[in-house]
Image: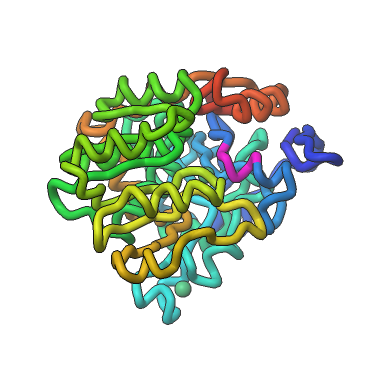
Amino acid sequence: MKFARLGDGGTVVLAERSAPVAGEGEIVVTLAACGVCGTDLEKLRGNYRTAGVLGHEAVGRIEALGPGVTEWAVGDRVFAHHHVSCGTCAVCRRGDPTFCPTYSRTNLDPGGFAESFRVPQENVRRGAVLRLDPAIGWEVGALLEPAGCALTALHRVGLPPHSSVFVLGLGPVGLLYARLAKALGAAWVGGSEIAPRRRAAAERGGIDAVVDPRTPGALRAAVDRATEGGGVDLAVVATGHPAVVRDAVGLVRRGGTVNLFGLPEAGSRLDADLQELYLRGVRLIPSYATIEADIAEVQRLAVAGRLPLADLVTASRPLAEVAEAFRLAGRPDEAVKVIVTGAAY
Ligand SMILES: [Zn+2]
Ligand SMILES: [Zn+2]
């Protein structure tokens, strides 16, 4: 079968390998759709130090069950989370499961951009496979994981009722974050983005103020108007550019929170006035990845019609054109979210 892997010189290439086989407690899923994530693009750029598995926003139909799998049937429509936490280590017990050592060790084989992929026993056993609601199409299914990342972040930083939120960078995850903050009751959500197409997606999703960060003073003015000069409760850095952290610090109120949400460039350094952070009591909270409970919650919000998602997928390409899908995903003026489709689509 065909699957996508990292090629030489920052490329993604299709390769051939034997089809995966479902071992004890495992399942094999025929790909329907898998979103191209910003972290997949960073892996191509050599900017992400994890192993080179591509594709972790995958949905499809179960094609085979390994011995001992009783709760699933061939043909079931599922989302399969690539990572699972152990649930028992000190990190998990303190409520930070995405930082569990087991979490980053588990993965789909050979990844989500494949004709079919194997879900390891640990993932199946620990609930990483979610049944897709009949109301959830493949496009929205492929958005559940990135939306789950936003929900996990919001849980980590806390979003008291009637909060004000500003999202810096409205790429796919920034848009999901902004829409989710609205859905969860934020009083005001603003955001900044260079690409007009993505600004339009934010406006469509009911974001209260959307500005171009290249306009001098635009972010500050939008936040001042909404908060009478006090600053937002939460500023979200949804890009990897370190300079944006400084902008975010300047937008939060005294005692407010800056959420490091986008994958920072490897080796980038924090450039902020530490005395300002100290005296204004700004919390700087990173959030990485998501867990099944949050992905399931996102699905419930989507089914209930509280979280508009479908319009964010603006392009899809079959697996054979995965390189073109990656090219599109790296062009903010051409696409918002790009998915790669497989035989179950
Ligand atoms: Zn992702
Ligand atoms: Zn753990």
Q: Could you tell me residue 86's position as x and y percent?
A: 46, 71
In depth, the one of 91 and 293 nearer the eye is 91
Residue 38 falls within the magenta-colored stretch: yes
Q: Can residue 314 be seen in this view?
A: yes
Residue 60 falls within the magenta-colored stretch: no
Residue that appears at 35% across and 26% down: 202
In depth, the one of 73 and 203 nearer the eye is 203
| Quadrant position of residue 28 | top right
Above-or-below relation of 229 to 120? above
| Quadrant position of residue 64 | top right
Residue that appears at 25% across and 60% down: 254
Q: Could you tell me residue 47's position as x and y percent?
A: 69, 50
Considering the whole magenta stretch, tell me its main secondary structure: helix
In depth, the one of 326 and 208 nearer the eye is 208
Q: Could you tell me residue 56's position as x and y percent?
A: 56, 45
Numbered range of the magenta stretch: 37-41
